[in-house]
Image: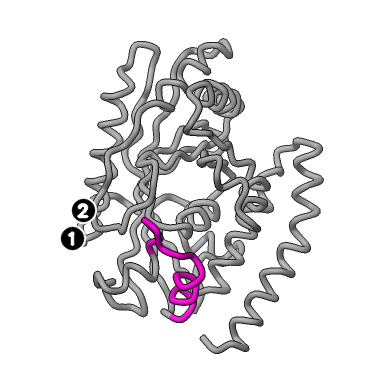
């Protein structure tokens, strides 16, 4: 991508933010049902401008169905990809809130920030998670707790899974919540399988500096992303959070392996969640 092309895309993205940002702030203030739609449109604009093509398989939660989504984590791009699918919110480490630009965008996404250095923070965040789940929202938790290079799955952490159930019980709910495994993979770039040497252009992990990583991302060309909604897990009052989390981890691992081998084992997601439909609504794909 040339410097002029990059400048034009950044300008277009800034224009999208200038239009959608005030509308989103107003929606958040009113707390209407449309409060989560502006971020979806913004993420879709980013994907279209920077040639990130998303496909889905599996069966996602129905519209307005609450779920705690347990996903693997490869890159900052995961947030854009998942955020473009439908209105939702994320759980993230508190350090992100202080990052320039990214912290402000995360706040606009209604991200729940957790201070992992304080034990009491889990209870506070879990209570808010429960409130949002009880309100029919999707809450996305990157269950590995950090990013990896995409070649292997790190163990899922279970602490917030059990805390969300406790919070739902405190809300007077029936004490059950849908755990939704979600696998995100980056199988192809420029139409060819991603090789190990190219993973650093997509995955952001360890002590990698952001600026060189973003430069490599921009120069590398179109990226294909495949998102797999795994089989949901019903988490009830007497469910073991560690067992449920391990089950979700195994489901995500199976889904990732299926994409790698070309046998994801899932039917395409039904309309309106199919990538083709999403593209028509704002562009989850770009040439």
Residue in front for this viewpoint, 53 or 143: 143
Q: Secondary structure at mark 2?
A: helix
Indicate the quadrant where residue 206 lies: bottom left
Say whether residue 246 is left or right of residue 13: left
Say whether residue 5 is left or right of residue 29: left
The answer to if 228 sits in the magenta stretch is no
- Residue 261's tag is 1
Disc 2 crowd, CA 10 A, few/some/many (<14, 14-19, 20+): some
Disc 1 crowd, CA 10 A, few/some/many (<14, 14-19, 20+): few
Indicate the quadrant where residue 28 lies: top right
Residue 231 percent coordinates (x, y)? 31, 37
Q: Secondary structure at mark 1?
A: helix
For disc 2, the marked residue is: 257
- Residue 222's tag is none
Residue bounds of the magenta highlight = 203-219
- Residue occupying the point 61% across, 45% down: 97
Figure check: 220 above or below 246: below
Asked if the residues shown at circle 1 and circle 2 are in contact, with their CB atoms under 8 angstroms apart, the answer is yes
Residue 37 percent coordinates (x, y)? 66, 49
Figure check: 230 above or below 206: above
**How far is the residue under mark 1 from the one under mark 2?**
6 Å
Residue 167 percent coordinates (x, y)? 52, 17
Question: Which residue is the extreme one toward the left?
Answer: 261
């Amino acid at each position: 991508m040339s410097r002029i092309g990059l400048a034009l895309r950044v300008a277009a993205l800034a224009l999208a933010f200038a239009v959608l940002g005030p509308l989103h702030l107003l929606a958040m203030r009113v707390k209407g049902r449309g409060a989560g739609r502006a971020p979806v449109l913004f993420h879709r604009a980013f994907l279209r401008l920077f040639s990130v093509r998303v496909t889905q398989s599996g069966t996602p939660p129905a519209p307005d169905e609450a779920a705690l989504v347990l996903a693997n984590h490869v890159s900052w791009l995961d947030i854009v990809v998942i955020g473009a699918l439908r209105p939702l919110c994320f759980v993230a480490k508190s350090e992100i809130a202080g990052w320039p630009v990214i912290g402000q965008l995360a706040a606009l996404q209604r991200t729940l920030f957790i201070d992992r250095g304080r034990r009491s923070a889990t209870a506070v965040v879990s209570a808010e998670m429960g409130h949002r789940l009880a309100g029919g929202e999707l809450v996305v938790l990157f269950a590995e707790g950090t990013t990896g290079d995409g070649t292997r799955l790190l163990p899922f952490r279970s602490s917030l899974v059990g805390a969300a159930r406790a919070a739902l019980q405190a809300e007077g709910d029936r004490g059950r919540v849908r755990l939704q495994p979600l696998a995100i993979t980056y199988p192809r770039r420029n139409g060819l399988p991603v090789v190990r040497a190219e993973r650093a252009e997509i995955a952001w992990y360890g002590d990698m500096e952001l600026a060189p990583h973003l430069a490599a991302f921009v120069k590398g060309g179109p990226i294909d992303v495949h998102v797999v909604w795994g089989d949901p897990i019903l988490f009830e009052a007497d469910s073991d959070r560690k067992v449920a989390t391990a089950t979700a981890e195994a489901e995500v691992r199976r889904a990732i392996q299926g994409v790698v081998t070309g046998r994801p084992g899932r039917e395409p997601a039904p309309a309106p969640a199919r990538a083709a439909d999403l593209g028509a609504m704002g562009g989850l794909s770009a040439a």
